Image: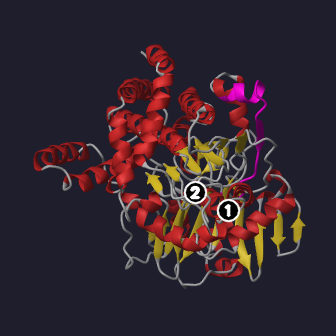
């Protein structure tokens, strides 16, 4: 079936190109004058480190990307995403040039007594408003697909910062894209085929997990058939949407494929299941790039040529959960050392398939009232039937402000923030040591921790294994051997990242990082076999692949934002008026 679909794809290439051009005219074009400037497409492979990319290339899981690198000379380079190595921080920096006040995937505001998790759309929307104050997103006038922030895009599909303010199907472009997709027989057939393949894979993964007695959750909480259908639908819709956008001539497109990250968490970053997902993503990249090249060759009155970037936002390191070694979660361990205290510790797996299913249910609910009564009743019945198979995400439920536990623990993979609710201000390390000496002693005795980080006035103190210590100021670093920073790379660069993280307004009174073990695994505070959020094992080293004509070497996601603005935005006529118009 897969071979047949690919053959049909090649056979229908010419008619399909003409169809996309017609669809582009029907949907309209962005409100930019045709200026002949190049646009850009960013395809994100969520969670794939540079080292694991190279391994996948060598083993043949990414044949199209390998061809681009080896035969066409595209430029491939690692880059440094810094701390925290999580999607919220890195994507905010790339899209808006600002990652201030994002200390992880989860954190706690002591003053407001509010817990944040980057799965609550209302919170992500408020965060985006804060991040982009006085700034322009690099996707201005463009499209974003399956992202956390919209980057000022006009069209956003499954973008957390845009879900609640306006549902996708409430927009004319959203409904138009869906209807066009549904009337594309080849795409619908591909969704059905991918659903079957995804379902069979999920069954094999469950069998493998049972045979190997994996303690980690090796599959999602919803049924494998529903998960396969949801993932196939979203993958095809975002690929289709990006291709239509190319023919529409939108200035910027950002498409994120996150299946690898989820499977890697469950099975490990180099497991056959995770690398198998990369093969699927490689096919989507090929489809989008072929459309980019066809559109560039087409004779059209309006349009633009595009540069293509394939990148990851962070990597994943092979991991062993803290709870497997200790028999308790980190929060439970901390509470046990403190005695009679109340604890707030809530975390769950990313659950991308579940999140997409919930988003689809929201879209269906919003669509019901706008359909003819009979059709609306059918959609309502289908939504309710599907809803019975989609469990609620307790972590994403609204946080109750009246709650005030004594200790709050928020983990993001191997990175953990611990907050003590005695006072609303951050505590210095010496204050924590005086108030909870037994806790600090027990933490320092553990060989599962790479760091314990605390504040000391204007400086930051890093306590490492073997009595090592680093005191980091704004301009200098004082080290007592063994140096706790050097195992993670350049000392000065690591010190800057740790300092910036620790002095942030929402960072914990104590910040812990799981240890980088001699076998290359990282101790993580979540139940996962691949982890990210901290440093070590490649989680801080994503990759960037580009056809932009010269190597794109960037030291940080903030530099990447500036590079995109300079190359694709400020070079456009009337760019400053466009910013003012926002």
Q: Residues within 10 Å of mark 2 (few under 14, many from 20)?
A: few
Q: Secondary structure at mark 1?
A: loop
Across and down, in percent, residue 16 comes to 46, 28
Q: Is residue 386 something one can see in this rendering?
A: yes
Residue 98 appearing in the image: no
Question: How far from the left and from the top, in percent, is residue 58?
Answer: 72, 24
Q: Residues within 10 Å of mark 1 (few under 14, many from 20)?
A: few
Name the one closer to the observer, 468 or 274.
274
Determine which residue is flagged by label 2: 33
Asked if disc 2 and disc 1 are in contact, CB closer than 8 Å, the reply is yes
In the depicted view, which residue is nearer to us: 109 or 554? 554
Q: Give the magenta-colored segment's residue range.
A: 65-84
Choose top left, top right, bottom left or bottom right for residue 47: top right
Is residue 229 shown left or right of residue 54? left
* Residue, disc 1: 573
N-term-proximal mark, 2 vs 1 = 2
Q: Residue at x 79, y 41 (%)?
A: 549
Q: Does 143 sit above or below residue 89?
A: above
Q: Position of residue 98 (x, y in %)?
A: 65, 67
**Residue occupying the point 70% across, 65% down:** 452
On the image, which quarter does residue 87 sit in?
bottom right
- Residue 379 lies left or right of residue 397; in this view the side is left
Q: Give the structural element (helix, strand or loop) at label 2.
A: loop
């Amino acid at each position: 079936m897969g071979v047949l679909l690919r053959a049909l794809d090649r056979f229908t290439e010419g008619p399909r190109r003409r169809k996309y051009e017609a669809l582009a005219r029907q949907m309209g074009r962005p409100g930019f004058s045709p200026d002949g400037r190049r646009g850009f497409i960013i395809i994100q492979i969520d969670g794939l480190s540079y080292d694991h990319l190279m391994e996948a290339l060598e083993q043949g899981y990414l044949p199209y990307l390998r061809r681009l690198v080896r035969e066409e000379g595209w430029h491939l380079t690692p880059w440094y995403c810094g701390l925290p190595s999580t999607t919220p921080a890195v994507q905010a920096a790339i899209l808006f040039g600002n990652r201030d006040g994002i200390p992880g995937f989860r954190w706690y505001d002591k003053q407001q007594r509010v817990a944040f998790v980057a799965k609550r759309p209302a919170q992500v929307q408020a965060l985006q408003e804060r991040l982009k104050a006085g700034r322009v997103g690099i996707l201005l006038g463009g499209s974003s697909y399956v992202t956390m922030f919209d980057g000022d895009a006009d069209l956003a599909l499954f973008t957390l910062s845009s879900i609640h303010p306006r549902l996708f199907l409430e927009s004319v472009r959203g409904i138009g894209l869906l209807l066009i997709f549904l009337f594309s027989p080849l795409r619908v057939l591909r969704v059905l085929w991918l659903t079957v393949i995804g379902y069979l894979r999920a069954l094999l993964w469950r069998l493998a997990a049972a045979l190997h007695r994996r303690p980690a959750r090796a599959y999602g909480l919803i049924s494998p058939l529903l998960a396969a259908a949801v993932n196939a639908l979203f993958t095809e819709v975002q690929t289709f949407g990006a291709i239509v956008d190319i023919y529409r001539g939108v200035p910027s497109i950002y498409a994120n494929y996150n299946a690898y990250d989820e499977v890697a968490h469950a099975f490990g970053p180099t497991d056959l299941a995770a690398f198998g997902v990369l093969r699927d993503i490689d096919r989507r990249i090929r489809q989008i790039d072929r459309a980019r090249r066809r559109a560039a060759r087409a004779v059209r009155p309006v349009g633009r040529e595009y540069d293509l970037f394939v990148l990851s936002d962070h990597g994943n390191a092979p991991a062993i959960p803290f709870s497997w070694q200790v028999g308790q979660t980190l929060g439970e361990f901390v509470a046990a050392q403190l005695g009679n205290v109340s604890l707030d510790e809530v975390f769950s797996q990313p659950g991308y398939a579940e999140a997409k299913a919930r988003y689809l249910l929201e879209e269906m609910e919003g669509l019901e009232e706008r359909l003819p009564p009979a059709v609306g009743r059918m959609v309502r019945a289908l939504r309710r039937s599907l809803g019975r198979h989609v469990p609620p995400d307790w972590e994403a439920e609204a946080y109750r402000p009246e709650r005030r536990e004594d200790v709050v623990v928020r983990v993001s993979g191997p990175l953990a923030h611990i907050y003590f609710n005695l006072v609303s201000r951050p505590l210095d390390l010496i204050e924590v040591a005086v108030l909870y000496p037994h806790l600090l002693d027990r933490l320092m005795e553990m060989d599962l921790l790479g760091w314990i980080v605390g504040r000391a006035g204007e400086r930051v103190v890093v306590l490492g294994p073997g009595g090592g210590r680093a005191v980091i100021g704004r301009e200098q670093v004082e080290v007592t051997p063994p140096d706790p920073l050097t195992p993670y790379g350049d000392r000065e660069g690591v010190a800057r990242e740790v300092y910036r993280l620790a002095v942030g307004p929402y960072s914990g009174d104590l910040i812990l990082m799981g240890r980088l073990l001699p076998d290359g695994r990282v101790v993580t505070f979540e139940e996962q076999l691949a982890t990210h959020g901290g440093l070590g094992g490649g989680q801080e080293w994503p990759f960037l692949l580009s056809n932009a004509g010269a190597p794109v070497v960037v030291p940080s996601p903030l530099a990447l934002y500036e590079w995109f603005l300079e190359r694709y935005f400020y070079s456009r006529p009337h760019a400053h008026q466009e910013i003012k118009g926002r």
